[in-house]
Amino acid sequence: MSDKEKIDLRQKICRGLKTSYENLLRRKAALDQDMVFADENGMPRIVSAKEALADYLKNKNK
């Protein structure tokens, strides 16, 4: 596998992960559910999916 093929594969995987994550946020937001994230100390932090989706979309284009 050439270097270009490896780069293309990584980019495709990264796009797929981002799409999957956004779909998860949208689905949970539509169902009015929460997301659980780890804070900077590794402790669980519960955030509404609507808030998480809004933050994600705000920072998506940066």
Image (cartoon, rainbow, N blue to C red):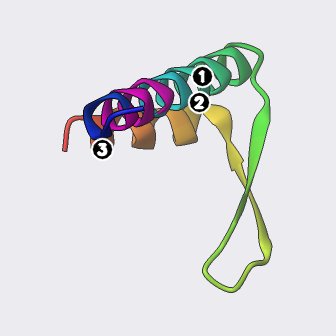
First in sequence, mark 3 or 1: give its number: 1
Name the quarter where the N terminus is drawn: top left
Disc 2 + disc 1, Cβ < 8 Å: yes
First in sequence, mark 3 or 2: give its number: 2
Q: Which residues are magenta?
A: 6-13
| Label 3 environment density (alpha carbons within 10 Å; few <14, some 14–19, many ≥20) | few
Q: Quadrant of residue 30?
A: top right
Q: Residue at x 43, y 28 (%)?
A: 9
Secondary structure found at label 3: helix
Name the quarter where the C terminus is drawn: top left
- Which residue bears the numbered disc 1? 20
Measuring from the top left, give residue 36's x and y in whole percent.
77, 52
- Which residue bears the numbered disc 2? 21
- Which residue bears the numbered disc 3? 59
Q: Residue at x 42, y 43 (%)?
A: 55
Callout 1 amino acid: Ser
Q: Quadrant of residue 12?
A: top left
Measuring from the top left, give residue 2's x and y in whole percent.
33, 34
* Residue 61 falls inside the magenta stretch: no
**Secondary structure, magenta segment, majority class:** helix
Q: Residue at x 54, y 40 (%)?
A: 51
Determine whether 20 is above or below 58 in the image: above
- Toward the front, the furthest residue is 1
CA gap between label 3 and label 1 equals 16 Å
Does residue 44 appear to the left or right of 57 in the view shown?
right
- Foreground disc of the pair 3, 2: 2
Does residue 19 appear to the left or right of 49 in the view shown?
left
Secondary structure found at label 2: helix
Determine whether 34 is above or below 29 in the image: below
Callout 3 amino acid: Asn
